[in-house]
Image (cartoon, rainbow, N blue to C red):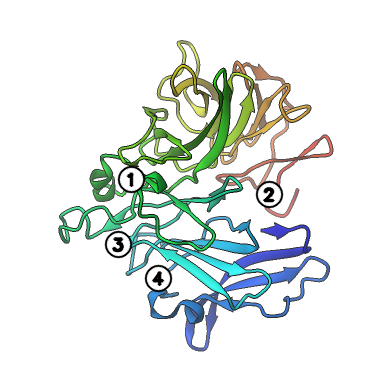
Amino acid sequence: MIDEQRATLYLDAAIMRAKGPRHEIFALSLADGSIEPGWPLDVATALGASFDPSVQNQRGALALFKGKVFVPFSGHWGDCGTYHGFVVGVSVDEPGKVTSFSTRARGGGIWAQGGVSGDGQSLFAVTGNTFGTSGWFGTTGWSDGEAVLRLSPDLARPIESRDYFAPLDWRDLDRRDLDLGGTAAIPFDVVGPNGARKLIFAIGKTGEAYLLDRDNLGGVGGALANARVTTNIAITSPAVWSGADGALVVLQGEGAHCSRGEPADGLVALKIRADPAPAIETWCGSVARAGSPIVTTTDGRSDPIVLVVGAEGDNRLHAFRADTGEPLATPPETMRGLHHFQTLIAAEDRLYVAADGAI
């Protein structure tokens, strides 16, 4: 993550030291790559025995909020070891000042590549499956897994139902390893006749999407609306665009409710409306495989176009009208070295994509 004002790059590195594996958070100067004074921060040293770096894994994006860098943690493939979902907050001015949140139950990893999201007021983290809560290994009730959690900058544990959401079937999701936390929460506003509605979009591996009230997440079972939107396991990085009559959430996947005659493979666009009641509508597009989409406009709102690369498929650029899903003409050339979740960048009227050894 880059802090433009400080000209600093922040990252977490898994490093093997003489005393074993460690997670260290670095601050690097953009000017010359040097390590900023006071860094790196050794997470295990800062947090003590509650954080075991040998079983914790860091794969989600970092966030900068209220003068702190926030780093999400999960476990390694296979849910091995006694790991927990962690968010670690480090002051950018005084890196020795550290706060943290961790799930009460074992597991509950924050896996999503989007990491921790925010709306300028709060942070939102999405957790995966937990252990010891569903009857297999004990009788403990819900303990922070399969959840969207609202976190304040001090990372105090959410205790009121307005500050967390979990699906009613969270126990079944735990048993089947169908994480809600495979995709980051997306906060956005939908403008309607009665003003702006503050919402959160979340989608789990099952392909079930949930709309939540951002001011009151609703506790267990408290979604405003939910719908099965993909038939595949959804682990994705969606894009969002807000228009005059709703918001558009676009993600890689196989559409579960495409209009008749539309292809159901590769791209799903969800039109989110708030009035007269929260609802989800769908259009689908055909993209040969697994890139992550972006939405571009001419002025921040007008002429929205969905763009995505067919990573690990046809490796071509694909474009669609955001309002209707109509395919638009794109270059026929293929690209080399693209991988799953590959995301375009739009800058200065050009599109860029980083591939193996090339841009």
Q: Is residue 114 visible?
A: no
Mark 2 or 1, nearer chain start: 1
Image position, residue 32 (x, y; %): 82, 71
Image position, residue 12 (x, y; %): 58, 68
Q: Secondary structure at mark 1?
A: loop
Name the residue type under label 4.
Val
Tell which tag, 2 or 1, sits nearer the viewer: 1
Which residue does the numbered mark 4 point to in the structure image? 55
Distance CA(mark 2)–CA(mark 3): 38 Å
Q: Residue at x 49, y 23 (%)?
A: 274
Distance CA(mark 4)–CA(mark 3): 15 Å
Image position, residue 67 (x, y; %): 65, 63
Q: Residue at x 35, y 59 (%)?
A: 78
Q: Secondary structure at mark 2?
A: loop
For disc 3, the neighbor class at 10 Å (few under 14, some 14 to 19, many from 20) is many
Which disc is residue 105 wearing?
A: 3
Q: Is residue 346 visible?
A: yes
Question: Quadrant location of the N terminus?
Answer: bottom right
For disc 1, the neighbor class at 10 Å (few under 14, some 14 to 19, many from 20) is many
Which residue does the numbered mark 1 point to in the structure image? 178
Name the residue type under label 3.
Ala
Mark 1 or 4, nearer chain start: 4
Which residue does the numbered mark 2 point to in the structure image? 355
Q: Secondary structure at mark 3?
A: loop
Name the residue type under label 2.
Ala
Mark 2 or 3, nearer chain start: 3
Front residue of this view, candidates 16 and 65:
65
Tell which tag, 4 or 3, sits nearer the viewer: 3
Name the residue type under label 1.
Leu
Residue 126 lies, with reference to residue 255, above or below; the image says below
Image position, residue 235 (x, y; %): 46, 43
Residue 204 lies, with reference to residue 16, above or below; the image says above
